[in-house]
Image (tube, rainbow, N blue to C red):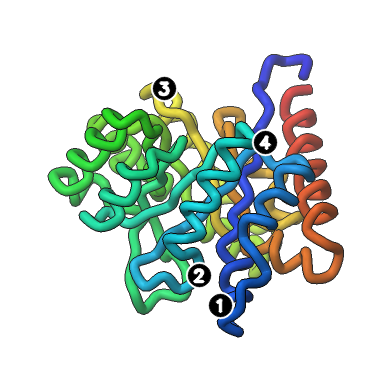
């Protein structure tokens, strides 16, 4: 890249491989096999969300993923709620990264970002203990300057900006609509503010082939975590092809932003 922008890493979330498995109560499809295929297709790491209700990823999956990824030399990004149970699991496994997310049992998927500013006293000690154990800590937040500042204040390593609202607006109103562009501007400003405060910037939620380019072109973004769309697309073209295509969209957008 001529202008000096660093490449964007691709983390593949394999939660919904486990969703399909659990629908029939079988042992297949195996999330670890999905992780192996994803790494072989060019993913830089694997993301898995261990929910309180274990609706997809299980404790045994985390055990197996940690074993495989350590051998493969690739990172696991463990998405987790800020609870005593999840903290204990993370401290036992010590994954490369832990992304703290809001979680409600009744939600279909993660809705919005973690309110770091409003729950400082609950989040800060968890961040500290995970970092002391050698795990990089990411906070899944909205691109709100107060939340970005709060993340920096409690010494998180990373913020992952919630891109769901942008992707929804792009699909409903159009990629270049005023509605989508306004949210993209907030994401861009949030990413710049986070980087100024010394935070690494990731992004994720709802991203597909159409919406990935504007997000990957944000200069401060270093990693995208994408799951549901890739697993859905894999039904039609296979997981390796879906990942390679997403990787190509990311790299092309980055090269264009760096030109």
CA distance separating discs 1 and 3:
43 Å
Left-right relation of 89 to 241: left
Q: Which residue is mark 4?
A: 217
CA distance separating discs 1 and 2:
7 Å
Q: Which residue is mark 2?
A: 56
Q: Which mark is residue 22?
A: 1
Q: Circles 3 and 2: CB distance less than 8 Å?
A: no
Q: Residue at image x 37%, y 54%?
A: 80
CA distance separating discs 3 and 4:
18 Å
Left-right relation of 50 to 16: left
Give the secondary structure at mark 2.
loop
Q: Circles 1 and 4: CB distance less than 8 Å?
A: no
Q: Residue at image x 73%, y 32%?
A: 254
Q: Which residue is mark 3?
A: 196
Q: Circles 1 and 2: CB distance less than 8 Å?
A: yes
CA distance separating discs 4 and 2:
32 Å
Q: Nearer the viewer, mark 1 or mark 3?
A: 1
């Amino acid at each position: 890249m001529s202008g000096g922008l660093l490449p964007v890493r691709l983390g593949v979330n394999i939660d919904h491989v486990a969703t399909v498995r659990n629908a029939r109560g079988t042992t297949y499809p195996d999330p670890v096999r999905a992780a192996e295929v994803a790494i072989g297709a060019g993913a830089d790491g694997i993301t898995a969300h261990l929910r309180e209700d274990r609706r997809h990823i299980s404790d045994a999956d985390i055990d197996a993923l940690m074993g495989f990824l350590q051998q493969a030399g690739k990172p696991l990004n463990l998405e987790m709620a800020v609870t005593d149970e999840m903290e204990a699991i993370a401290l036992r496994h010590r994954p490369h990264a832990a992304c703290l997310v809001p979680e409600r049992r009744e939600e279909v998927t993660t809705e919005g970002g973690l309110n770091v500013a409003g729950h400082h006293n609950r989040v800060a000690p968890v961040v500290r203990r995970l970092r002391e154990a050698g795990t990089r800590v990411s906070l899944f937040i909205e691109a709100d300057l107060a939340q970005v500042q709060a993340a920096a204040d409690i010494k998180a390593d990373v913020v992952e900006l919630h891109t769901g609202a942008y992707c929804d607006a792009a699909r409903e109103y159009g990629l270049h609509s005023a509605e989508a562009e306004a949210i993209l501007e907030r994401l861009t400003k949030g990413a710049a503010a986070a980087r100024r405060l010394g935070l690494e910037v990731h992004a994720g939620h709802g991203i597909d082939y159409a919406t990935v380019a504007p997000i990957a072109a944000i200069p401060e973004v270093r990693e995208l975590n994408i799951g549901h769309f890739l697993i859905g697309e894999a039904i039609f073209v296979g997981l390796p092809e879906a990942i390679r295509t997403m990787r190509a969209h990311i790299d092309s957008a980055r090269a264009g932003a760096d030109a």
